[in-house]
Image (cartoon, coloured by chain):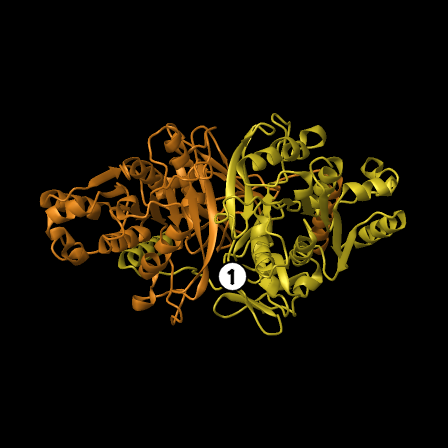
Chain colours: A orange, B yellow
Amino acid sequence: MKSKTFLLSLCLLLLAAAGQTFAQLLAAPQVDAERRVTFKIQAPDAKDVRVINLSDSAAMGAKEYVLVKGADGVWSGVTNPCRPGFHYYELSIDGFRCSDPASQAYFGWGKWCSGLEVPGEGLDFYRAQNTPRGEVRFHWYFSKTTGALRKCLIYTPPDYDKNLTTRYPVLYLQHGAGESELGWTMQGKVNVILDNLIAAGKAKPMLIVMDNGYAAKAGAENPHRPRGEDNAFADLVVKELVPMIDANYRTLNDRNNRAIAGLSMGAGQALNIGLSNPDLFASVGAFSGGLWRFDINTSFNGLFKDAAKFNETYRLFWFGCGDLDGGFAGMQTFHNALEKQGIKHIWFPGPGSHEWQVWRQHIYEFAQVLFR
Amino acid sequence: MKSKTFLLSLCLLLLAAAGQTFAQLLAAPQVDAERRVTFKIQAPDAKDVRVINLSDSAAMGAKEYVLVKGADGVWSGVTNPCRPGFHYYELSIDGFRCSDPASQAYFGWGKWCSGLEVPGEGLDFYRAQNTPRGEVRFHWYFSKTTGALRKCLIYTPPDYDKNLTTRYPVLYLQHGAGESELGWTMQGKVNVILDNLIAAGKAKPMLIVMDNGYAAKAGAENPHRPRGEDNAFADLVVKELVPMIDANYRTLNDRNNRAIAGLSMGAGQALNIGLSNPDLFASVGAFSGGLWRFDINTSFNGLFKDAAKFNETYRLFWFGCGDLDGGFAGMQTFHNALEKQGIKHIWFPGPGSHEWQVWRQHIYEFAQVLFR
């Protein structure tokens, strides 16, 4: 072990000194034309090596793959055809779950894990084109609500630094449980999707603010699992984040130009915050989640009882879900109930599971009708 | 396996629906007052579990630690006292090297691996204070040099978006071999260090551009290991990056207000690019590297032969190295040779190895004398 590390270290130093360069030591899993993925894992001393699909079986063709050890000590295997899109996965090395050193790391499932990008046809909407690029800014701030330093990410459209008098509408966009403020950019490619839409004239240039959905009140008993009153995310958004963004960015700071949306846990946050604060938000989006024992008369403080008032208050109420998602039936029922009640909304049922590919599609659709 | 994943999945959905939240499922390694680190790894079916220190032995007190399995299937161990700072490490699970799922992931060693942050006294210079924060922007661009989409990171000082007529000097700052454009922010905390220096009036507000040091010429035979003419990084910086930054940011775009520096491999790049392009750069910094068979008469095209000319051309020539670094003697010799030759420079020898703690110190020192 010692000599190996030392040699690698020496090798890096020499390469550096000689100006020779290399980027990634390990070859990422290879996807073939049938969307089968080949894994090769160098683990000569392991007794059992598997690839664990962290989504539904169809995402990667099976829940897990037991790799086979070759004479060279490399464990390998080829998956069944995978579904196009982004899939979280892990390795299991003698039962120990870890990320694949050959993969880009993504924060999901409460930790850094591996992700597989499976290409497919007709998916150019999230492929970077040679068009003007927006930026994503890391913005740090000390929060009075949580008593801690926080980071949010802000997408600024391509012209933000050129049109210095233009003000922009703002979408607050939340990740799912176990993920972080990085999710929409790294897994979701939201910046690429918006760049493409804006270049095609299909979406209004907008700012997108992506904060971390975990926010424990200062002094909370368990800051990592804030419950009840200790969960200060709604307070943070309403009292601190929105004013801070309006103070620091060239926003259109009225409710008509402010929206909130999110996926899964973030859908719940978007519904709770957006539908409780009509003074702040005129548009709300819920992607694959957020409904819990829904009742048209009592949920969201009875907001849906008065259709005329709701329709007057909200410019856009949008929700979507993949048909393989465990929550699909609930959202379909929600849609039916709103239809019956005369509540204006857009319901976007589509193919797919509880996964990023669906949320890429959701933001792509949602952004096109937002702020119109 | 299947039922476990399903249950976790269900649990996440329920938590999300109920508005209950949690951030990180796993407890990170704990550092005690003596800077000993306790590791606990749940791997009941593994036969051999180790923590591998990816730096010199002193960084984490030993090159590796063999953990001991408890009755509960949790492998644990306590390190010797560690050196304060940031240390790359990995786990070895039955000989398979992987990152620790309980750690933040950092791109280093050509892959995503784990990092340990060991606190120490007198190290407030890289601790975020409640002072104005700069931002770090992710800036994507299509490069003609490489024929591919690239990303660079740009630190903008706290007032950048307030003083809309102010222009700023620019430091181009490069990571080391096996790392990426993320290194200076994630491992180096350069934004925190600059925020602190600027708040204290100890550094001029400046932009810092951090690109990826790997750049293969379009059509290169092996884009991951570009050699010779295929290694297009210098071309990229001179012909493409500098003009793009000057066109898109409020820079002071003369040589006196432009610097280039880097660590290890990046030190070599900074020396090569900075000392070959005096029309572009008046200040150069080399942190722990960049010298290769140095000869005062022939290295860098004989640039150091004419001390008067060199001293007139360069405003600041700064280099530093840790005394435990394998390259220390070479840099000390370089310093002696420059002294003898009458070349004005700053030599910053200090404690430490080939590690981020040293580079945090280097940027802290370098930034204070830069653009003065």
- Quadrant of the image occupied by residue B4: bottom left
Q: Give the x, y percent position of residue A298.
A: 13, 57
Residue B22 seen in the figure:
yes
Residue B347 or residue B88, whichever sits in front: B347
Residue B254 or residue A124, whichever sits in front: B254
Q: Give the x, y percent position of residue A195.
A: 41, 34
Q: Is residue B66 left or right of residue A270?
A: right
Q: Does B330 appear above or below B279?
A: below
Q: Residue furthest front?
A: B165
Q: Give the x, y percent position of residue B116.
A: 58, 60
Residue B94 seen in the figure:
no
Residue B278 or residue B90, whichever sits in front: B278
Q: Residue at x 87, y 40 (%)?
A: B306
Q: Chain of mark 1?
A: B
Q: Residue furthest top?
A: B219
Q: Is residue B74 left or right of residue B202?
A: left
Q: Give the x, y percent position of residue A357.
A: 36, 39
Q: Secondary structure at mark 1?
A: loop
Residue B69 or residue A5, whichever sits in front: A5
Q: Is residue B269 left or right of residue B45?
A: right
Which kind of residue does numbered mark 1 sit on? Answer: Thr
Counting every numbered tag in the picture gives 1
Residue assigned mark 1: B131
- Quadrant of the image occupied by residue A294: bottom left
Q: Mark 1 Cα within 10 Å, few/some/many (few <14, many 20+)?
A: some
